[in-house]
Image (spheres, helix red, strand yellow):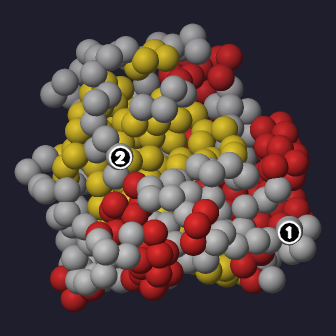
């Protein structure tokens, strides 16, 4: 039953933090708690013969020993089509300090701050979280390699394998319909072999700054300021609240584009998901463990186009994932994982 409740709240995890209005929070909690309980009779486990090798399995074998994790119990790793400048694919990425990365569509700098996790800049990390309920801050700054419509760039979670358990297709479709009405522009698919929950990046970022090269803000600052004059030039989009409300709607967002001439700074934060403990913190419902409901997968930090190209894709492992992930990997490829 605990697993089912975890699944029920997975969608809460990925877009309570995106909600344009705090009044959505209670609605989302109640809907997914109720829908999740209906899955109790339909949960099934995949047999070894049903399992296929995926990107998460490949990422698992690149992990170093736990004693070599600099931010234990967490390990931050590049994912699909994302490379950290000056680092190998197996190297740990900084937490609490900026690092440079590049994909086929975007080149920039990432700063990830996590509560309850060792930071590479402890003083600034402590200052940022002091007096806040937040568990995470993610700031991305960089340039696009081609012009892309604002309505085609999404932020959220994408996974390589089904949830555990995954909702039946009919229930998954019902969830999709309900949530799409609550949050315009939402892409939600919990029932497929590659689940995802995504929302428009320009509509969910808590602050967005658009600047000419050399005039961009310093992302070390705790709260990057809103500055979208260069992108919109419209009075009704100059505050973060108004910009989030309007650009969460695909029809409105399609009027604008991210171009190659400016530097874009996206800042988001989260008061629901504690990566340090790998638990959800939900109003009324309390805390829920994510290790089983994510089917042994690391958490995803991703921005992606409507047609499936990544701006960035990072995996956040927790040491409590390793036992189930390794058990699965040894079933599908016993030779490769025999000595792991």
The residue shown at (37%, 14%) is 147
Q: Nearer the viewer, residue 236 or 331?
A: 331
User: Could you say which quadrant of the image residue 68 lies in?
Assistant: bottom left
> From the image, which quarter does the N terminus lie in?
bottom right
SS label for mark 1: loop
Query: Is residue 6 in view from this perspective?
Result: no
Tell me: 114 left or right of 44.
Answer: left
Give coordinates of residue 136: x percent, y percent: 45, 64
Q: Position of residue 178 (x, y in %)?
A: 86, 44
Question: What secondary structure is found at the residue carrying circle 2?
Answer: loop
Q: Compare marks 1 and 2 and give the one earlier in the sequence.
A: 1
Closer to viewer: mark 1 or mark 2: 1
Q: Position of residue 92 (x, y in %)?
A: 21, 66
Q: Position of residue 155 (x, y in %)?
A: 51, 42
Query: What's the residue at 90%, 73% (across, down)?
Result: 41
Label 1, label 2: how many angstroms apart (C-alpha)? 32 Å
Residue with the mark numbered 1: 42
* Residue drawn at 16 percent across, 28 percent down: 214
In front here: 229 or 327? Answer: 327
Q: Mark 2 highlights which residue?
A: 80
Q: Which mark is residue 178?
A: none
Front residue (pair 92, 260) = 92
Q: Is residue 262 above or below residue 336?
A: above
């Amino acid at each position: 039953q605990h697993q089912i409740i975890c699944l029920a709240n997975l969608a809460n995890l990925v877009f309570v933090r995106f909600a344009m209005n705090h009044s959505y929070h209670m609605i989302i909690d109640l809907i997914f708690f109720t829908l999740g309980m209906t899955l109790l009779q339909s949960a099934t486990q995949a047999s070894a013969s049903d399992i296929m090798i995926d990107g998460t399995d490949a990422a698992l074998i690149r992990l170093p020993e736990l004693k070599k994790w600099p931010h234990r119990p967490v390990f931050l790793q590049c994912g699909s089509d994302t490379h950290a400048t000056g680092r190998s694919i197996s190297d740990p990425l900084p937490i609490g300090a900026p690092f440079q990365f590049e994909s086929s569509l975007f080149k920039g700098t990432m700063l990830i701050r996590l509560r309850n996790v060792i930071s590479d800049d402890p003083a600034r990390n402590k200052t940022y979280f002091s007096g806040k309920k937040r568990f995470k801050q993610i700031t991305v700054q960089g340039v696009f390699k081609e012009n892309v419509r604002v309505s085609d760039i999404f932020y959220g979670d994408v996974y390589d394998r089904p949830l555990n358990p995954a909702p039946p297709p009919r229930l998954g479709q019902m969830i999709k319909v309900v949530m799409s009405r609550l949050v315009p522009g939402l892409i939600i698919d919990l029932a497929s072999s590659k689940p995802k929950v995504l929302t428009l990046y320009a509509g969910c970022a808590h602050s967005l700054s658009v600047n000419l090269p050399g005039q961009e803000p310093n992302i070390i600052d705790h709260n990057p300021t809103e500055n979208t004059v260069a992108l919109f030039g419209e009075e009704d989009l100059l505050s973060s609240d108004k910009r989030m409300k309007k650009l969460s709607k695909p029809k409105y967002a399609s009027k604008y584009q991210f171009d190659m001439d400016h530097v874009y700074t996206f800042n988001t934060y989260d008061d629901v998901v504690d990566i340090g403990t790998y638990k959800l913190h939900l109003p009324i419902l309390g805390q829920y463990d994510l290790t089983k409901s994510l089917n042994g997968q690391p958490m995803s930090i991703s921005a992606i186009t409507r047609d499936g190209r990544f701006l960035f894709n990072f995996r956040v492992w927790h040491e409590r994932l390793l036992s189930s992930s390794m058990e699965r990997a040894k079933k599908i490829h016993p030779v490769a994982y025999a000595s792991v």
